[in-house]
Image (cartoon, rainbow, N blue to C red):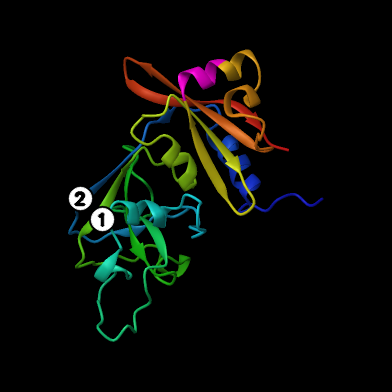
Amino acid sequence: MENPGPEEPIGVLREFVSRFGDKRLMSTSANVVTYTAALYNVIGSTHDPKIPGYPSWTYLLQQLGIGVGTNDHCYVDPQTSDHSHPAFQVGGHMTPNMDGTVPSSNICYLMPLCKWHNGKGNNHVAFAHSLTQILELHGYMTSEPAATFMARLSGQAPAALVFAADEGLKFQTLSDEDFTRLQSGSLADAIGPRVPENHIVLRRREDGKGLFYTVEQTRLG
């Protein structure tokens, strides 16, 4: 069997564990803000497959009312009335930094883009956008998938299972009781007999600096 590619679900999880498995993972938030200044593509952000039933950056935008209705198109100016500018195709990670990096504060922005404006050929290009309601993401780590970001959203979940399904990554929140069962027995005791073969478990913790998560269990075939 060939090794999964970097954008295959298992490959994405492996890359996440390789980069962040021993790190303190901030709890995350996504807030609608008004942002008027030009923004640049974040270099190294993940692709955004729109698969029904799977978490994606596109889904996160739409759940918070961005890129829906009459604003269902790429936000980069100029806005056209003849539909010559492609529609909203991906959730694009944006930064005020011309070099494409996410600031050390782990704050970046998310807005609807077409695939062309989200492409590598537009890295380091300043995007003006007259549509100014976008998402401000806190706790985002460059290259992480939507599933791991959303699993830590608002620090609400005591623990979370992030797993590779047929077409992408999914996550399932776990209660404290679920996590206790996991520690004392097996994952099947916590979530039932249908345990995903390839998964990681994130555990919420708290100290004097606030809420954070750690990777507590890894099972990647």
Query: Does 141 appear above or below 132?
Result: above
Identify which amino acid the numbered label 1 is placed on: Ile
Mark 2 or 1 closer to N-term?
Answer: 2
| Disc 2 to disc 1: CB gap under 8 Å | yes
Residue 156: quadrant of the picture? top left
Q: Assess whether residue 42 is covered by the magenta stretch.
A: no
Task: List x then y, in percent, for residue 200.
Answer: 59, 33
Q: Which mark is residue 134?
A: 1
Which residue is tagged 2? 33
Packing grade of label 1 (10 A; few <14, some 14-19, many >=20) is many
Residue sticking out furthest to the front: 192
Whether residue 134 is visible to the viewer of this picture, yes or no, is yes
Task: List x then y, in percent, for residue 55.
Answer: 47, 49
User: What is the span of residues highlighted in magenta in the rendered image?
Assistant: 175-180
Which element type, helix, strand or loop, lies under badge 2? strand
Residue 65 placement, left or right of 119: left
Query: Does 117 appear above or below 91?
Result: below
Q: Nearer the viewer, residue 9 or 100?
A: 9
Q: Residue at position x 32%, y 14% from top?
A: 208
Residue 142 placement, left or right of 137: right
